[in-house]
Amino acid sequence: MIHQLDARGLLCPLPVLKARKRLLPLSRGDVLQVLANDPAAWVDFPLFCQEDGHVLKDIRELEHGTTLYLIEKS
């Protein structure tokens, strides 16, 4: 199942903290799509996934400085 989180306008560490909270109730294999425009998220999300054991499936640059992070819950 695919879930969404809009973290645009939030600065480090809030996008990762909100993603962590949103992932908690999800089932293994569910995917969280996170929209973020914090420049630090490029570093934060890969580290977060590595530390928590989730899979960062994709990072896509969108328009207006927004980036989409696809995180599969492990």
Image (cartoon, rainbow, N blue to C red):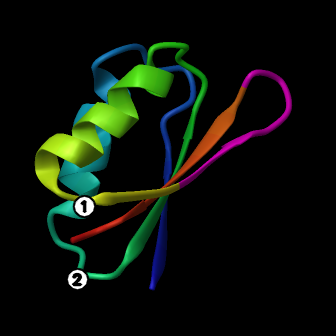
Q: Is residue 8 above or below residue 74?
A: above
Estimate the x, y position of residue 29 in percent, counting from the top left. 32, 82
Placement of 56 over or under 8, stated as above or below: below
Q: Measured from the top left, where is residue 10 in percent x and y? A: 45, 20
* Range shown magenta: 58-65
In the drawing, does residue 20 fall left or right of residue 19? left
Give me the residue at 70% from left, 30% from top.
66
Q: Secondary structure at mark 1?
A: helix
Residue plotted at (23% across, 81% down)? 28
Q: Residue at x 45, y 86 (%)?
A: 1
**Secondary-structure class at tag 2:** loop
* Residue labelled with disc 2: 27
Evaluate if marks 1 and 2 touch, with contact meaning CB atoms under 8 Å apart. Answer: no
Q: Determine whether 54 is above or below 2 in the image.
A: above
The residue that label 1 is drawn on is 23
Q: How many marks?
A: 2
Task: Give amino acid for label 2.
Answer: Ser
User: Which quadrant: the C terminus?
Assistant: bottom left
Question: Is residue 53 covered in magenta?
Answer: no
Return the residue found at the far right. 63
Residue 68 position in % (x across, y down): 62, 45
Residue furthest front in the image: 50
User: Which percent across, then down, holds residue 5?
Assistant: 47, 51
Dot 2 crowding, Cα within 10 Å, few <14, some 14–19, many 20+: few
Q: CA distance from mark 1 to mark 2?
A: 8 Å
Q: Is residue 27 above or below residue 25?
A: below
Q: Amino acid at mark 1?
A: Leu
Q: Nearer the viewer, residue 46 or 25?
A: 46
Please state if 40 lies on the left or on the right of 39 as rendered: left
Residue 63 counted in the magenta span: yes
Q: Is residue 14 left or right of 74 when viewed as pictured?
A: right
